[in-house]
Amino acid sequence: MPSPACKLRILLLSQEYPPDTGWGGIGVYSQLLAIQLTQNGHHVEVIARNGKARTKKSTTIDGITVHRIGATIARRKLIGRTLDKMWFSIEVAKTVRHLNMKSPFDVIETTEAGYEGWWLARSPKWAKSIVVQCHGSNSRGELPLGLLKVFHKVDWFLSYRVELSLLKQANIITVPSIAVRAQLLEEGIANSKIYLVPHGVDIEKFTPKTNYEQGAEEQLLRVGFVGRLEVRKGIGFFLAVAELLLDTPQVEFHLAGAIHPSMKQRLKKYSPDVLNRLIFHGNVPFDDMPSFYRSLDVLLIPSKFEAFGYTTVEGMSTGLIVIAGEEGAGSELIDDGVDGYHVKPDSSPLVIADLLNCILHSKNRWDAMRMSAREKTVGSYSINAWSRKKLEVYYKLLRQGSIV
């Protein structure tokens, strides 16, 4: 049996893997983990979804072999997310068995959100080799407006049921926050197989802006929102704050992320005055995100629930004043009033509007908060600390005799 000094053969299952399918936080997580494990000397392969090109092939980037399989995400529009992900899971199982025959893997990691390893885990033999990483439950789906809402609600519910079956089949589950652990316990998942492994960010890449003091008296405050523009991410609260500050042109509102289809409908209800205050940057490439953060002063991300919150930690690492939703991991990552602020997405936005006005006119007052946020990230949420904890879980799996 491999000891902690031995190098592992690790297989990551994730529909999202940049650059072809780098849709969001799961894609960022998968790529960061693969690169970090490879740099530590482990052999890593990834099974991911085909992008728009639909080129079924294996490529090696950064020493990581990425196998692109299955249909593109467009298939979901025809058959729904549940059947699409189940179908993809079957395609994944076939590919895993083929690759494992050539050279067996020590550990296979899959996500709960996409349940890529669900079909594989139906076999107790394979379930022993699988670690399920929790990113965000299908119990919290974004529903569109209109007549199709009921069908999407059923689709999300079915996806949630399949997700639960995967979690119950797995022997080891890793969660990025105490909030997710609590959620799993409510769903009847045994505490004994849940391991807390907070994610990490590249603290060498996400660094504060230099010579910040030189611009401290500049009468301009740049407030950012990073993530998918949808209700559950708190975009409604963000827009309400922007509306309250219509008469304060010194406050700019910058948004980075794709607009959810349901949000496109909701945006039509806002006045042109509010929409004209917003500066949309679209999907900012991950390599450009550090500079985007450094262009801001405040990060306002009032999510209704975050399993972890990469944007929160990235903002803290970049030395921003971060105001994050307190539900989920937000209250775990931020010590309210010390290294950032909590906000209830359903509360009055007036408090945050007043806070932004205060920051606008006295930026230096928050220097200690920015420094504390950066120090916390360096001390607790680096990618090195994260990968070490992840490997501890992998070796725990091996000690249970997981090798297929």
Image: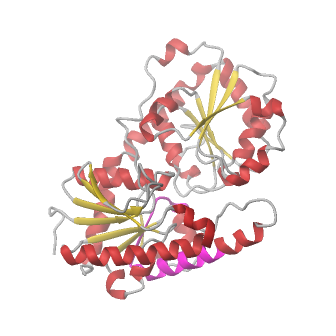
In the foreground, 50 or 303: 50
How far across and how far down the image is residue 356, in percent? 69, 29
Quarter of the image for the C terminus: give it.
Answer: bottom left
How far across and how far down the image is residue 95, in percent? 33, 74
Whether residue 12 is visible: yes
Q: How is the image coloured?
A: secondary structure
Whether residue 136 is visible: no
Point 36% across, 50% down: residue: 32
Q: Main secondary structure of the magenta part?
A: helix
How far across and how far down the image is residue 127, in percent? 36, 81
In the foreground, 160 or 370: 160
Point 37% across, 35% down: residue: 205
Q: Is residue 212 above or below residue 31?
A: above
Asked if residue 273 lies left or right of residue 130, the reply is right
Asked if residue 34 lies left or right of residue 221, the reply is left
Q: Is residue 214 above or below residue 11?
A: above
Q: Does residue 67 belong to the magenta stretch?
A: no
Question: What range is drawn magenta here?
Answer: 157-179
Q: Is residue 346 above or below residue 84?
A: above
Point 56% across, 62% down: residue: 74
Q: Is residue 245 above or below residue 111?
A: above
Point 26% across, 55% down: residue: 64
Asked if residue 349 lies left or right of residue 5, the reply is right
Question: Which residue is outermost to the bottom?
Answer: 124
